């Protein structure tokens, strides 16, 4: 059933990474297997987890670990001594019979791409470790259990790629920001200068007094000469002789009382 292709259904991803999804090959409890085509026209087998399994951190980690154990680390250039592939950190055994890994994504919606060969196991080989049961050192031990995420059977779709802004747009924004900063600094300096100059102009300046020129003035000269006593008009006793006692000239005789 793994090599029987069926048309894509609603909710299937149109592409996974650089690979175009063309048809369904297999459906498993942990994910789906698709037939895809690479950029070079090569047919590939693509496996992607279900949305429920992708939301489970443990299930997602088992899927990614199986891919890395099968050669994902060797493709990324990590090698050990004598040019041998480095062993995984977890020390787990390599998945037996796993196909060659062409590419994979271990993000929130992990998937893997392997070469497609009719009649041979493809990417569905990496979905087997996701489903675990009661095992102990490779032997059946304890009861099996059903994962809680089996009811969510939709494929885990990666989010749309975030468009990358061109470099010209970034440089333009940097130049605009730098120009705005320069203008802001110039504005601040201009305001400070205006405040300082305005404060100096508003302070009252002391009024300068005119120079003092002392010119001595002469003392005032009187218009009339010094006053002198004027001579009396009345004759002196020597000139007029004896005068009548009791009455002086100019007196009114009617004021006198009769004797």
Image: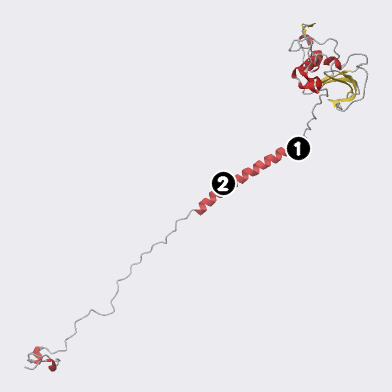
Q: In which quarter of the image is residue 142?
A: top right
Q: In which quarter of the image is residue 229?
A: bottom left
Which x, y percent locates residue 104?
Answer: 81, 20
Which x, y percent locates residue 45?
Answer: 88, 19
In the picture, measured across the screen, residue 103 lies left or right of residue 234, that is right
Disc 1 on helix, strand or loop?
helix
Work out whether 24 lies above or below 97: below
What residue appears at the point 71 percent right and 37 percent down from the top-left corner?
174
Mark 1–mark 2 distance (CA, rounded to whole Å)? 35 Å
What residue appears at the point 70 percent right and 41 percent down from the top-left corner?
176
For marks 1 and 2 on the same chain, the one whose residue lies earlier in the sequence = 1
Which x, y percent locates residue 211?
Answer: 41, 61
What residue appears at the point 63 percent right and 43 percent down from the top-left corner?
184
Q: Mark 2 points at which residue?
A: 192
Q: How many labels does the image show?
A: 2
Visual colour scheme: secondary structure
């Amino acid at each position: 059933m793994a090599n029987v292709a069926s048309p894509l259904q609603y909710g299937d991803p149109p592409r996974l990474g650089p690979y175009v999804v063309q048809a369904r090959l297999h459906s498993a409890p942990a994910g789906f297997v698709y037939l895809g085509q690479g950029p070079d026209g090569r047919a590939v087998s693509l496996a992607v987890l279900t949305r429920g399994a992708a939301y489970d951190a443990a299930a997602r980690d088992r899927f990614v670990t199986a891919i890395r154990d099968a050669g994902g680390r060797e493709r990324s250039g990590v090698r050990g001594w004598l040019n041998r592939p480095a062993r995984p950190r977890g020390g787990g055994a390599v998945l037996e019979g796993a196909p060659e890994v062409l590419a994979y994504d271990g993000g929130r919606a992990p998937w893997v791409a392997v070469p497609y060969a009719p009649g041979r196991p493809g990417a569905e080989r990496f979905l087997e470790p996701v489903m675990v049961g009661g095992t102990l050192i490779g032997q059946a031990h304890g009861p099996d259990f059903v994962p809680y995420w089996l009811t969510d059977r939709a494929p885990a779709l990666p989010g749309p790629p975030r468009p990358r802004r061109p470099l010209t747009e970034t440089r333009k924004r940097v130049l605009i920001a730098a120009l705005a900063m320069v203008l802001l600094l110039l504005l601040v300096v201009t305001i400070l200068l205006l405040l300082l100059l305005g404060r100096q102009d508003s302070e009252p300046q002391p009024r300068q007094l005119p120079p003092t020129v002392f010119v001595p003035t002469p003392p005032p000269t009187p218009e009339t000469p010094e006053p002198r006593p004027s001579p009396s008009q009345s004759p002196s006793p020597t000139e007029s002789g004896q005068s009548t006692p009791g009455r002086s000239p100019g007196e009114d005789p009617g004021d006198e009382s009769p004797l």
